[in-house]
Image: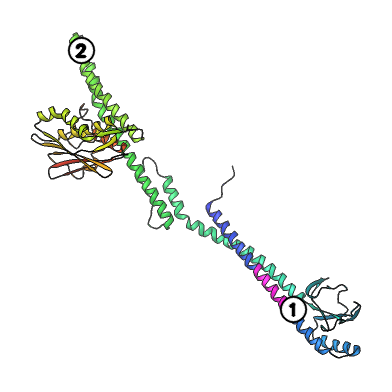
């Protein structure tokens, strides 16, 4: 497997490539601009010389023309001239070094001969005459070309040095800029199940990394909370099952210490059966909550009249309320689409919880309020309130607000409110608890459905 390039190396190469491209582009533009500038200057010089020659030779005979040409060309050593007659026969060369073959097309052109470069201008000596001799001016531009070649070499050298310098500076800047990321990696690598409380520093980081660190810290907080809940959950399961298992073992061992009558064995089995039934119910409740945690609760949707469902539950709890001298009442009505058995279980848990904490002579009331798009069901009971710091924990598993906790109680394992919340959420609703002015109130908000 090939080694992967580090992010610092990639950024350094990217910086170097960008610098090289920009430098090369700028150098090519400068080179082309310089070359065009030299061509323009050469053209102006040659055209100016052409105009001067035409004026100087106007009206001269052949002997005077050659003498005047020699005089004119002697003033500029890098300029040469060739004249041909109308038949193309060479009539005059100002220098022996003029190449034998010159461009024939009119206008300006460039010619290289041996180690010398020329700018060549072809034009008629007398433009107004059809039989005018053809004049060719040659300007030695070798020094121009040498300058352009040196400049091109300088451009390539500049491109290379710029790319190298940018790569080194880019690597240094990238490594320095990514230092917080490496620090984040070090801290993240040290996180384990025993150190979920570690957090990434957000204060002195760049904005982009600070946002990432904040997201990772939020994730660590969620994981820490979930892990703490799972640990507490496992401890609570062991705590709840320890007492009934101990009772079963002790009772069975005592029963087997000696021979007993059939009635004694039957009584022992009945006692063990009660403990086993409670443990089976506890396991079923735990499986129910596990399904809820994984989104496996799929309520059956059917039209329900909540007033009818609540009235049936109040009728069921009526004997218990009568024994405790607690008055039950229901107000309002509402229609939803939901799972009948699941909602009955949730409301039954709330009513059972309300009856247990309502003092003699108290009252349990159910209010149903139908609103646009949702139905609210409030189950409230009179009695001692619940402290505000305990309200957020009421729906935790195995949590009991009553400090007089009964271990292994077959009646109340502390899962009722957790199951109720799972059922409400499975229906797309929310549940919360309020406690003030001598009343404790559970508020359920359920969508009405289609």
Q: Is residue 308 above or below residue 102?
A: above
Camera-side residue: 190 or 240? 240
* Residue drawn at the location 16% of the way across and 29% of the way down: 315
Q: Position of residue 435 (x, y in %)?
A: 17, 43
Which mark lies nearer to you, 1 or 2?
1
* Residue drawn at the location 74% of the way across and 78% of the way down: 43
Query: Can residue 440 be seen?
Result: yes
Q: Position of residue 319 (x, y in %)?
A: 12, 27
Disc marking residue 88: none
Camera-side residue: 247 or 146? 146
Quadrant showing the C terminus:
top left
Q: Which residue bears the numbered disc 2?
A: 266
CB-based contact (under 8 Å), mark 1 and mark 2: no
Q: Is residue 155 left or right of residue 166?
A: right
Is 407 included in the stretch rendered in magenta?
no
Q: Position of residue 419 (x, y in %)?
A: 27, 34
Camera-side residue: 402 or 238? 402
Is 31 included in the stretch rendered in magenta?
yes
**Quarter residue 1 falls in:** top right
Q: Main secondary structure of the magenta part?
A: helix
**Quarter residue 30 falls in:** bottom right
Q: Badge 2: few (under 14), some or many (20 or more) residues near its Cα, within 10 Å?
A: few
The residue range painted magenta reads: 28-40
Q: Is residue 186 left or right of residue 145?
A: left
Disc marking residue 43: 1
Q: Position of residue 363 (x, y in %)?
A: 11, 37
């Amino acid at each position: 497997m090939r080694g992967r390039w580090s992010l610092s190396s990639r950024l350094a190469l990217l910086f170097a490539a960008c610098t090289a491209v920009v430098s090369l582009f700028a150098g090519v533009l400068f080179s082309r601009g310089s070359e065009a500038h030299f061509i323009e200057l050469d053209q102006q010089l040659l055209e100016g010389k052409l105009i001067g020659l035409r004026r100087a030779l106007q009206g001269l005979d052949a002997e005077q023309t050659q003498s005047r040409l020699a005089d004119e060309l002697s003033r500029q050593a890098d300029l040469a001239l060739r004249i041909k007659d109308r038949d193309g026969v060479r009539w005059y060369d100002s220098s022996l070094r003029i190449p034998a073959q010159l461009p024939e097309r009119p206008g300006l052109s460039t010619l290289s001969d041996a180690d010398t470069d020329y700018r060549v201008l072809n034009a008629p000596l007398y433009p107004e005459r059809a039989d005018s001799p053809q004049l060719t001016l040659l300007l030695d531009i070798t020094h121009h070309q040498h300058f352009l070649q040196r400049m091109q070499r300088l451009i390539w050298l500049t491109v290379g040095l710029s790319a190298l310098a940018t790569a080194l500076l880019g690597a240094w800047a990238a490594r320095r800029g990514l230092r917080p990321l490496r620090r984040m990696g070090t801290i993240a690598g040290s996180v384990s199940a025993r150190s979920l409380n570690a957090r990434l520093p957000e204060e002195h980081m760049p904005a982009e990394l600070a946002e990432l660190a904040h997201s990772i810290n939020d994730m660590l907080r969620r994981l820490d909370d979930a892990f703490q809940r799972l640990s507490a959950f496992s401890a609570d399961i062991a705590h709840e099952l320890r007492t009934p298992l101990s009772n079963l073992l002790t009772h069975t061992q005592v029963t087997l210490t000696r021979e007993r009558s059939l009635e004694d064995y039957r009584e022992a089995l009945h006692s063990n059966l009660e403990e086993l039934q409670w443990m089976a119910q506890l396991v079923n409740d735990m499986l129910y909550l596990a399904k809820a945690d994984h989104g496996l609760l799929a309520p059956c949707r059917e039209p329900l009249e909540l007033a009818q469902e609540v009235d049936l539950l109040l009728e069921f709890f009526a004997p218990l309320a009568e024994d405790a001298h607690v008055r039950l009442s229901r107000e309002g009505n509402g229609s939803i689409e939901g799972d009948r058995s699941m909602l009955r279980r949730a409301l039954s848990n709330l009513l059972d919880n309300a009856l247990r904490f309502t003092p003699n002579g108290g009252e349990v009331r159910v209010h149903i309020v139908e609103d646009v798009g949702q139905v609210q069901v409030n189950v409230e009971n009179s009695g001692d309130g619940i402290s505000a710091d305990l309200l957020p924990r009421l729906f935790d598993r195995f949590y009991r607000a009553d400090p007089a906790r009964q271990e292994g109680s077959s009646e109340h394992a502390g899962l009722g409110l957790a199951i109720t919340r799972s059922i409400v959420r499975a229906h797309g609703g929310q549940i919360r608890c309020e406690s003030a002015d001598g009343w404790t109130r559970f508020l359920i908000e359920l969508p009405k459905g289609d």
